[in-house]
Image (cartoon, rainbow, N blue to C red):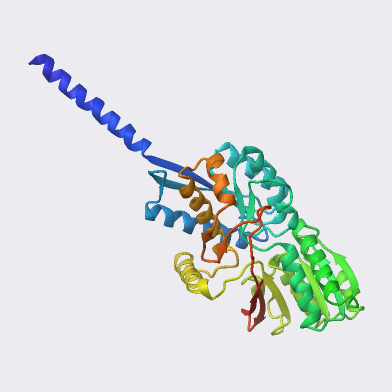
Amino acid sequence: MLFKSKIIPLVAAIACAFAGSTYAADELIVKIGHVGPISGAIAHLGKDNENGAKMAIEELNAQGTMIGGKKAKFELLAEDDGGDPKQGTAAAQKLVDAKVNGVVGHLNSGTSIPASKIYHDAGIPQISPSATATAYTLQGYKSTFRVVANDGQLGGTLGRYAVQINKAKRVAIIDDRTAYGQGVAAEFKKGAKAKNKDVEIVSEQFTNDKATDFNSILTAIKAKKPDVIFFGGMDAVAGPMLRQMKALGITAKFMGGDGICTAKLAELAGDAMADGQVICAEAGGVIDAQKKASDDFRAAYMKKFGVEVQIYAPYVYDSVMTLVDAMKQAKSSDPAVYLPFLQKIHHKGITGDIAFDEHGDIKNGTLTLFTFKGGKRELMTVTK
């Protein structure tokens, strides 16, 4: 009896231990990395992107998502790259060292491009929700994707719009010397010239992504009397630039890509924007079929964070969901196993149908043209 009284609790303890390890084996930890500028002049855009990732992760966990017969527990590993390439590569290496299963980011082309080599060398799939530089997906990396249109589509469409709809004959171009700014400005020029070879580029100037004083370049531009000024850069620079344009009496149309096409631009520009003066494009767009899902996301975002979506949070959400869809199809969160499924994915997202071409660019990407009236973004048209 004494022997039995000791052995039975021991057996029970061993059984409990095995039960615990079985439960742990049935739970799959999936780490999703996100990188964006959470500090610096465009921190509002980085935080917007990170919030989109948080919403996706929370929803996946609430749904009890299964991968290969195991309940997945998703963890978000968020890093700040400050919009700086050197900081971006350090953040990328940190995520690789943490053995993330996939990465959503970075926000900027200038950080996404150098970081993509680090992810590629580690065999980790990367989806950028907002990097538009054409070079990003032309490096030959099979692990690199994006869910928005590229600068060729974005800048080219704006260039054609400037001369076809705005009837611009004299155009000035400014860029901020970043990979994104230079790329979108070059494509704008190419698009404008393709539509009307007689359009005159009266001035080409450059600044940097931290500048606040533009009086010298704007004074030089004013003397050329342009119909349109195109700026390749971000809203943190575009806002003060618009203020100084007004102070100098420059009334030309002001055009730019997705970097300036944010809800915050009106605040940054103050009262310097005349209604309809600014025309910009978002490297994405929701057609009627996705409108309800997109509206529901924006309402949920406002309820959760107390602010409006700036621009790319829905694309971050879709990027996370696309990664996980590939994992579910592959029945594995192992990057080497699910990458081939990601390359062939057809995911129905809230921003549209997501599928990638041989370079990792989104197929049939849409663009949305906006203007500003009464300090609010106003949709003009969605195009492909």
Tell me if 348 is positioned left or right of 168 in this view: left
- Seen in the picture, residue 174 relative to 29 is either above or below; the reply is below
Residue plotted at (62% across, 79% down): 379
Q: Looking at the image, which residue is at 75% across and 54% down?
A: 135
Tell me residue 323's x, y (percent): 53, 51
Tell me where residue 298 appears, x and y as whole percent. Answer: 50, 70
Give residue 196's quadrant in the image.
bottom right
Q: Is residue 308 left or right of residue 362?
A: left
Quick check: 245 above or below 53? below
Q: Is residue 351 left or right of residue 282?
A: left
Give the image quarter of residue 309.
bottom right
Residue in the picture at 51% in, 73% down? 289
Q: Is residue 79 above or below residue 305?
A: above
Please identify the quadrant where the N terminus is shown: top left
Is residue 376 shown to the viewer in this render?
A: no
Q: Is residue 54 visible?
A: yes
Quadrant housing the C terminus: bottom right
* Residue 74 screen position, x and y as percent: 45, 48
- Asked whether 210 or 379 is in front, the reply is 379
The location of residue 87, given as percent across then percent down, is 68, 46
